[in-house]
Image (cartoon, helix red, strand yellow):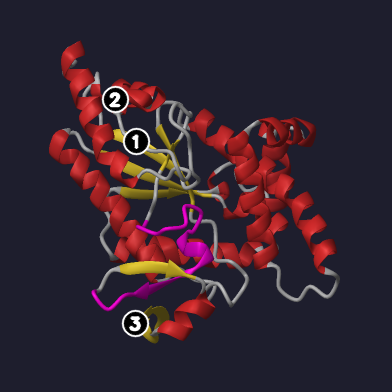
Amino acid sequence: MLTATPSTVERTTADILRLLLPHRRHVRGDTVSEPEAFRPQLTQLAAFVRTGEPILFTLPGFPCKSPNPDKVLGPLPDEGERLSLRFLDELCATIEAVYPPGARMLICSDGHIFGDHIGVADGTIDAYGTALCAMIHDERRACLETFDLGDVLGETGYDEKRRRVHEEFAPTVDDLRAQVHHDENMTRLYRGITRFLVEDTVGHTGTKSALQRECRRRAYGVIQRSNAWSSLIAARFPRSVRLSIHPQPPGAAKFGIRLLDVDDQWTTPWHSCVLLRADGTPTLLPHHRARALGTLAYRDGRPSHYVA
């Protein structure tokens, strides 16, 4: 294994980061686009480039579909996931053009870690994960691998795994409340997750204000578990380049990345469905909006997306 010179490492890591920057998920008004502003990622990349190893990216996400049928086509991966997997695989291939050892992407599916807080059963999450792995295999996405809660703590059940991961890695609710009150990015995350929980709630019979209170409470639980999952991934893969599907500011430990080109920085394939515009470009919309604008298309006998 050859060791690169310092100047080669610096140049190559900057080149790799420039390939990521056009796909950066950031908050509105953040126009930072220079590699030097992303020092944590340059440091993480350099650890691989220095020794000539393939880069390992870790990306928490792809948990399960929203339980709200007005937002998604169903409980299994569809065109949104397929296009997202293609993007991630092709991104790794693009990196190989400037860094021959290449890169691989570890999708760290996080559905099981907070499934009890979002009202999705473990069996439903398992079915989503199995179909996602089949999609990766069938589409021959050679740069992609998966990792989830089932891969840790042996044969223990999911409830016990959640409890133990929470106990070891989760921050306290009091700590999170302090961050929400004093950190603008954490405030956005808390509000975004609360909004998702409200939208994803099906069959609520109480008042809207009661639902809002309940979802605000559960949002802290989701963030606790998400942070715990991130900490577990960091401990399990300490040398990885850490990505996020949430907007991240320059200099953060994670790099926010968009899976598809959409206007809303919080939209993901598991909270929406794909509408192919007349020119063939995809966008992500809630199911009820896509249904009003397009015709349903099928893939392998299952609803896949809409065509305008």
Can residue 129 be seen in this snapshot? yes
- What span is colored magenta in the figure? 260-279
Residue in view at x 24 percent, y 24 percent:
49
Q: Which residue is mark 1?
A: 56
Please identify the quadrant where the C terminus is shown.
Answer: bottom left
Snapshot quadrant of residue 251: top left
**Residue 167 position within the rendered picture, expressed as x and y whole percent measured from the top left:** 73, 35
Q: Residues within 10 Å of mark 3 (few under 14, many from 20)?
A: some
| Among numbered discs 2 and 1, the one appearing first in the sequence | 2
- What amino acid is found at the position of numbered circle 3 in the picture? Ala
Amino acid carrying mark 2 in the image: Phe
The residue identified by callout 3 is 308
C-alpha separation, residue under disc 1 versus residue under disc 3: 38 Å
Q: Quadrant of residue 6?
A: top left
Q: Identify the residue at the far top of this view.
A: 6
Q: Earlier in the sequence, mark 1 or mark 3?
A: 1
Front label number (1 vs 3): 3
The alpha-carbon separation of the residues under discs 3 and 2 comes to 44 Å
